[in-house]
C-alpha cells in the first residue's frame, strides 16, 4: 500500500467528469483527500467535429512523428475549413473561426495573442484566405514538432531509468 495523505491533481477531459464527481464523494468516506480536477479540451480531428482522431487514420491528426512536409500536406489537404466555398464568397462573407480547424489549432499553439486576434479578424472578414490560415498553422506546428523530435532523440536509456527510478514522493 502506498503513502497516504498526498493530494492528487488529475487532468481529464470533460467526458470523465461524472466519474470524478463520484470519486470526490467516495474519497471523503474513505478518509482520503478529494481529487482536484483540471478539465482539458480535446483537439478536434483535422476533419472537424464530425470526425475523430485515430491512429488507424493517419490523416485525422498531426502526430509528433510527422515531418514538417507531412504536417503541411495534412493541414492543406485534410484540415476542415470554415471558409467560403469560393474565393469570391469567402471575400464577401469571411470565414467561420468557430468551425475552422486551422484557427482552432492556432488557439492552442500560437503563443502571440495579438497575432491570433489579427488572424481571427482577417479570416472572419474575408481578408485572409483559407490557404493563408493553413500556412500560418503549418508555420507554427512544424517547428514545435521538430523541437519535440530533436529533444526526444536525446533521450537515452539512462535518462529513462533515472525518470522511472523508485523514490520518495514526499
Image (tube, grey):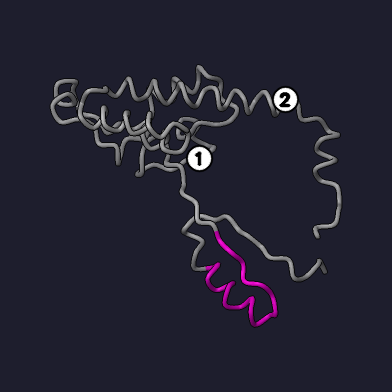
Q: Quadrant of residue 127?
A: top left
Q: Secondary structure at mark 2?
A: helix
In front: 55, or 72?
72
The reply to whether the magenta stretch includes residue 40 is: no
Residue 55 rendering spot, x and y as whole percentages: 54, 37
Report whether 144 appears left or right of 46: right
- Taking the view exactly as shown, the residue that stands out farthest to the bottom is 29
In front: 5, or 154?
5
The 10 Å Cα crowd at callout 1, few under 14, some 14 to 19, many 20 or more, is: few
Residue drawn 30% across the image and 33% down it:
120
Residue drawn 55% across the image and 22% down it:
143
Label drawn at residue 54: 1
Report whether 104 appears left or right of 29: left
Asked whether the residues under the numbered discs 1 and 2 touch, taking CB atoms below 8 Å apart as contact, a structural biologist would say no
In front: 83, or 59?
83
Residue drawn 20% across the image and 29% down it:
125
Residue drawn 72% across the image and 25% down it:
153
Residue interval drawn in magenta: 19-37
Label 1 to label 2: alpha-carbon separation: 24 Å
Which residue, given by chain and number where applicable, does mark 2 sit on? Answer: 153
Q: Quadrant of residue 82?
A: top left
Give the mark nearer the N terminus: 1 vs 2: 1
Amino acid at each position: 500500500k502506498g503513502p497516504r495523505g498526498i493530494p492528487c491533481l488529475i487532468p481529464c477531459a470533460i467526458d470523465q467528469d461524472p466519474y470524478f464527481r463520484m470519486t470526490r464523494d467516495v474519497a471523503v468516506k474513505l478518509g482520503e483527500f478529494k481529487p482536484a480536477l483540471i478539465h482539458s479540451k480535446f483537439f478536434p480531428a483535422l476533419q472537424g467535429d464530425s470526425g475523430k482522431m485515430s491512429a488507424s487514420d493517419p490523416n485525422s491528426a498531426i502526430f509528433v512523428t510527422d515531418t514538417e512536409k507531412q504536417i503541411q500536406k495534412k493541414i492543406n489537404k485534410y484540415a476542415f475549413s470554415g471558409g467560403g466555398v469560393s474565393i469570391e464568397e469567402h471575400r464577401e462573407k469571411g470565414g467561420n473561426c468557430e468551425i475552422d480547424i486551422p484557427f482552432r489549432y492556432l488557439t492552442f499553439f500560437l503563443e502571440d495573442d495579438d497575432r491570433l486576434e489579427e488572424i481571427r479578424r482577417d479570416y472572419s472578414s474575408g481578408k485572409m484566405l483559407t490557404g493563408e490560415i493553413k500556412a500560418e498553422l503549418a508555420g507554427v506546428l512544424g517547428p514545435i514538432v521538430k523541437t519535440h523530435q530533436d529533444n526526444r532523440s536525446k533521450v537515452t536509456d539512462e535518462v529513462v531509468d533515472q525518470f522511472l527510478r523508485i523514490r520518495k514522493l514526499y
